[in-house]
Amino acid sequence: MNPKHLHVISFDVPYPANYGGVIDVFYKIKALHNAGIKIHLHCFEYGRAEALKLESICETIHYYKRKLDKKYLLNKLPFVVVTRTSEKLLENLMRDRNPILFEGLHSCFLLNDDVLNDRTRIVRMHNIEHDYYKNLEKVEKSVLKKLYFGMEAKKLERFEKILSKVNYIVAISPSDAKELSTRYANVKLITAFHQNEEVKIKEGKGNFCLYHGNLEVGENNEAALYLVNEVFSKTKTPFIIAGHKPSAALITAVSNYSHIQLKANINTQEIDELIKNAQINILPTFQATGIKLKLLSALFNGKHCIVNTPMVGNTGLESLCSIQDTPENLLTEITRLYNLPFDMVEKNKRSEILLAHFSNSINAKKIIELI
């Protein structure tokens, strides 16, 4: 086995790196490549095109069509797992004896096959998946989708036991590492990989508050509606919501207020500019799983950052945020921070904490130690 080579099985094509899970995958691959590791990338494809950009950081790339037939909804395995299978993938893995990094439970179907038992197998856990799906079930309005999320949560909870077969489980947050350690003995904490190399906070004052996220995801839609209905309907402070595929309910809610803008389906670069130019990045969540990469983007690039406890609890980032858990306290804090210039002492504090615990190069070295 050559430790300088690593197979990475990705649940999706990890470029463009424009949503949570693939951001972690892409910047992990890039950091490992920069550290001298030769990456053999295996991607399940279902809507995102093959990416030429990946060729510059990977030794080899293989694409496999995800099997999205509805018949797999009736399978005893989770739909997100059983639809990511390929005999060709196993054939490609068996050409050598190099270690394998499985990205998420989604990509772990082949762990059922004993033929891989003599390989170093690492699973990157992006969330406690069954908890994530239970929370999606809670916020979903569609009866059919709610049923799907509920069934999938139960299947994922059963399937998670497959992790007892692997050499290492790599958790993305301290809270996930703590929970997984109650069930498995081989858990390591390696925090999220991301696009930021240094803290770059734009001087001067912004003239709006920002919430951003993939609005197609139920928890993000819920957070945006909460901010519109419970917070920004009660102030005239300019507020922008930015993200992909907003719901009809959110579009309607925003249309009632002239000081609230909805910027839908804009690209990553435009969202990055909004993060830098906002006076306050406001990021509540009602799902305390994993670590939210949008929080890291706000802390590396934005000025003041207001969150709630589920967004930041047990991440190591608590001291860098203003934590407010009620609409009343959020409104009071917005009033306090909206005209307050961002303190460059706080920028230095962010740099110290973020670069110590969320450095891609340091985290890549931690993975290399495992292989």
Image (spheres, grey):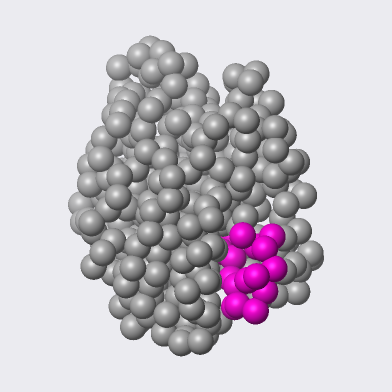
Q: Does the stretch in magenta take in 113? A: yes
Give the residue at x 39% y 18%. Answer: 251
Could you tell me which residue is drawn at 72 percent across and 55 percent down?
Answer: 160
- Above or below, 183 against 363 in this view is above
Task: Identify whether 30 is placed above or below 44.
Answer: below
The percent coordinates of residue 162 (x first, y second) are: 72, 60
Q: Nearer the viewer, residue 103 or 255?
A: 103
Q: Position of residue 259 (x, y in %)?
A: 31, 22
Number of marks: 0
- Is 219 inside the magenta-drawn segment? no
Span colored in magenta: 110-126
Residue 264 appears left or right of 8: left
- Residue 30 x, y percent position in the rendering: 33, 69
Determine whether, in the image, residue 322 is placed left or right of residue 276: right
Q: Is residue 233 visible?
A: no
Query: Residue 235 appears in which quarter of the rendering?
Result: top left
Residue located at (69% from left, 26% from top): 147
Q: Which residue occupies the foreground of this view, 323 or 190?
A: 190
Residue at image location 30% in from the left, 50% down from the top: 50
Front-lying residue, 196 or 183: 183
Q: Does the rendering let one see residue 207?
A: yes
Instruction: State the image coordinates of residue 227 (x, y, percent, origin top left).
Output: 48, 29
Describe residue 217's horizontal placement relative to residue 338 as left or right: right
